[in-house]
Image: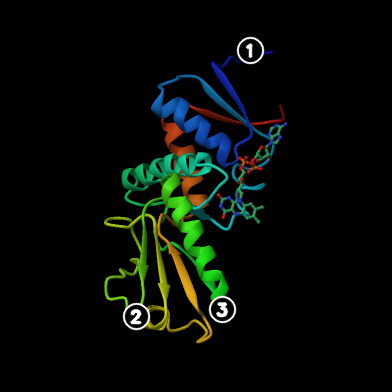
Amino acid sequence: MSKHTAEVVICGAGIAGVAAAYHLAVKRGLKNVVLVEQGDPLSLTSDKSSEAYRNWWPGPDGQMIALMNRSIELLEGLARASANRINLNRRGYLFATAEESKISLLAQSAEQAAHQGAGALRVHTGQATTYRPSLPEGLEGALDGADLLTGAAIHRHFPYLSPRTKAVLHVRRAGWLSAQQLGMYLLEQAREHGARLVRGQV
Ligand SMILES: Cc1cc2nc3c(=O)[nH]c(=O)nc-3n(C[C@H](O)[C@H](O)[C@H](O)COP(=O)(O)OP(=O)(O)OC[C@H]3O[C@@H](n4cnc5c(N)ncnc54)[C@H](O)[C@@H]3O)c2cc1C
């Protein structure tokens, strides 16, 4: 019977396992990392995701925003290193309300998030000529924080929304990516740096 040894054994090759393998093998230079996966890599939960991300987690404190800012920084680094093979974009999230009374709640949550590190709130009324729409693709020059639009500004920039819409909050450090491509990139890089994928059950 052959004997196999490893410095680190990772259970499961979902996105968490391949990310751990990437960081240990590529970033920390560990030579003998083994991923043990009972099925196919990235095929259990990690291929069901909506593939969205955001740094928008207001309250009760700034911990989630700090965690997500750091995670998004890592994603941006991977996007740049891979010529954006992971299709990371910064289209943002749009929260809309048709209720006048909710405008102040949107503004309060954005001010709280700004205070906790999500980036500044910009408020636009009237025609909102200073509001900058997101680019459909890519990251460069993207804004953070959020934009609150009310009145005519909404229909100028979001003509597809119901005319009853009273306010929209456009959260900027948010968007979509290909989680499958992200996983494959991390796994390929880890394997190029010596990590091994073994089919089996821990
Ligand atoms: C419908 C849906 C939408 C989602 N949308 C988003 C989103 O928009 N944004 C976001 O960030 N997250 C989203 N998520 C969450 C995200 O997809 C998961 O948090 C993530 O995929 C979990 O990855 P994982 O590696 O921890 O788990 P998994 O992908 O489940 O990987 C675990 C792996 O371990 C293997 N395994 C388990 N036990 C053993 C064992 N004993 N031996 C060997 N192998 C084993 C399994 O076969 C599996 O491949 C969504 C999830 C769902 C279900």
Q: Mark 2 sits on what residue?
A: 126
- Residue at image position (69%, 13%) is 1
Measured from the top left, where is residue 140 in percent x and y? 28, 55
Q: Distance from label 2 to label 3 (Cα)? A: 17 Å
Quadrant holding the C terminus: top right
The relative height of residue 147 versus residue 155 in the rendered view (above or below) is above
Q: Quadrant of residue 121?
A: bottom left
Q: Are marks 3 and 1 in contact (CB under 8 Å)?
A: no
- Ligand 1, seen in the image, is in the quarter at top right
The span from disc 2 to disc 1 (Cα, nearest Å) is 72 Å
Identity of the amino acid at label 2?
Gly
Q: Is residue 183 left or right of residue 77?
A: right
Residue nearest the observer in this picture, 1 or 160: 160
Q: Confirm or reject: label 3 Cβ below 8 Å from ligand 1.
A: no
* Residue tagged 3: 98
Image spot of residue 48 (x, y percent)? 63, 54
89 vs 45: above or below: below
- Three-letter code, disc 1: Lys
Earlier-in-chain disc, 2 versus 3: 3
Q: Which residue is mark 1?
A: 3
Which residue is at 39% across, 55% downward?
145
Q: Nearer the viewer, residue 107 or 190?
A: 107
Earlier in the chain: of badge 2 and badge 1, it is: 1
Q: Element at badge 1?
A: loop
Q: Residues within 10 Å of mark 2 (few under 14, many from 20)?
A: few
